[in-house]
Image (cartoon, helix red, strand yellow):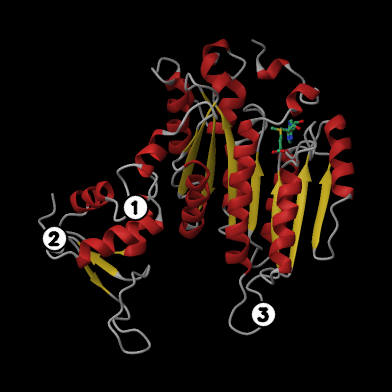
Amino acid sequence: MARARDIPDDADEKWLYSEHAAAKHEILSRYLDAWLPILGRRRRGSHFRHKQLILIDGFAGRGRYVGGEPGSPAIMFAQAVKAVEAGYAERVVIRCAEPNATNFGHLQEVCAELRHDRVDIVPREQTFAEIGAAVSEWARRQRPAAPTFVMIDPYGVKGVELALLRELLSNARLEVLLTLMVRDPARFLKEGNYAEPLTALFGGDSWKACEDAPNRAECLLLRFQEAVRPDVAQWATPFRVFEDERKTILYYLVHLTNHDLGMREMKEAMVAKSGEMTFWPVTMRPPAQMALEGAEAEPYPTLQQRLAKKYKGQTLTFVELLNDEYPDGAWVEKEHRAAIKAMAEAEEPRATIERVEPKTQTGRPARGLKLEDSVSFPGAVE
Ligand SMILES: C[S@@+](CC[C@H](N)C(=O)[O-])C[C@H]1O[C@@H](n2cnc3c(N)ncnc32)[C@H](O)[C@@H]1O
């Protein structure tokens, strides 16, 4: 089989739309759909929280696939238009970097068709390193810097340096969705060609510890998470993408952010795609999805058991619990809320909720569970 790196970036064969590209695009689209309104939401009154929102497509590609399917720049544009037209943002600026001349030619044609008076999309014939440096320089001059989303989607591992990620993420309002390509590096880790780009991406040679690991792909993700957390980003949430039925991991989509709500929204977008934090090719059914469809109806007994055990004897706010829970498993806010409320309302309660606002506006006892409410689990801390 040809290695991805042996096929030129502008070969048409690299621009056939795959299931993986569709999965990635669905996550991108769902996330921006949720996140642009949160970032841009108006304060009480008529002002926007931020005058403009910025989207950077660091490895933009052609903007379209050979079957006419839209690429990431067009997806960003569509979601930006939706956000400004719904009144969530005043203006969105999109910048796309693509250094390959053939791919850039396609990208220019695609971008020329994407017009809106409050969404400005500009393709640039440059590398991610170049656009990334310009973005961080620009952010340094702004006070405060505009919220910025950066997609970094290389074919391989070349062209992304941890030093640049660190610089970009030092802007607290910036976040990154990174394709961490692991299949080929995992196969050919000892061959030498990967040494330089991996060392740049990991900010050191911690990846070498994976050379003899039983699962090199997973090992690379773990070492990468260690390299970024917590100094570069507080959260590094991975979505695993399988290539085929043999469960070969093709890449991880890793979301880097210092914003806990952003982390949770991204996980929701990822879980919405396949019922868990993994993409399964169509020929396979995701096991967790089957579990969800089968035994696990509301109030999610497995989740309840897990919470009762994990937080035994502890009191924490609902948002603290979510932030602690999100890095594991497929359960998101909705399931946690249902599970905890049912635990609190059971004849023999297995949790107690202390609400910041115990009464509703009509004076009835509140029954909801807000992020700032406290939850206590009985028992002694283990
Ligand atoms: C996986 S494709 C991008 C696909 C696109 N994000 C999408 O979802 O439609 C990677 C692209 O990065 C380009 N590229 C290669 N080296 C680059 C670099 N150093 N900086 C930015 N882009 C690069 C390639 O030419 C290729 O078009």
Q: Residues within 10 Å of mark 1 (few under 14, many from 20)?
A: few
Q: Residue furthest front?
A: 294
Q: Are marks 3 and 2 in contact (CB under 8 Å)?
A: no
- Image side of residue 279 versus residue 214, left or right: right
Kind of element beneath mark 1? helix
Q: Are marks 2 and 1 in contact (CB under 8 Å)?
A: no
Q: Quadrant of residue 64?
A: top right
First reached walking from the N terminus: tag 3 or tag 2: 3
Quarter of the image that includes the N terminus: top right
Q: Determine the residue positioned at 42% across, 21% down.
A: 209
Q: In front: 239, or 301?
A: 301
Q: In front: 339, or 382?
A: 339
| Residue at numbered disc 2 | 378
The Cα–Cα distance between marks 3 and 1, rounded to whole angstroms, is 33 Å
Q: Residues within 10 Å of mark 3 (few under 14, many from 20)?
A: few
| Residue at numbered disc 1 | 324
Q: Determine the residue positioned at 53% across, 22% down.
A: 244
Kind of element beneath mark 3? loop
First reached walking from the N terminus: tag 3 or tag 1: 3
Amino acid carrying label 2: it is Pro
- Image side of residue 233 versus residue 152, left or right: left
Amino acid carrying label 1: it is Asp
Label 1 CB-ligand 1 distance < 8 A: no
The Cα–Cα distance between marks 3 and 2, rounded to whole angstroms, is 45 Å
| Residue at numbered disc 3 | 47
Q: Determine the residue positioned at 33% across, 64% down.
A: 318
Q: Residues within 10 Å of mark 2 (few under 14, many from 20)?
A: some
Q: Residue 186, position in %: x, y?
A: 51, 19
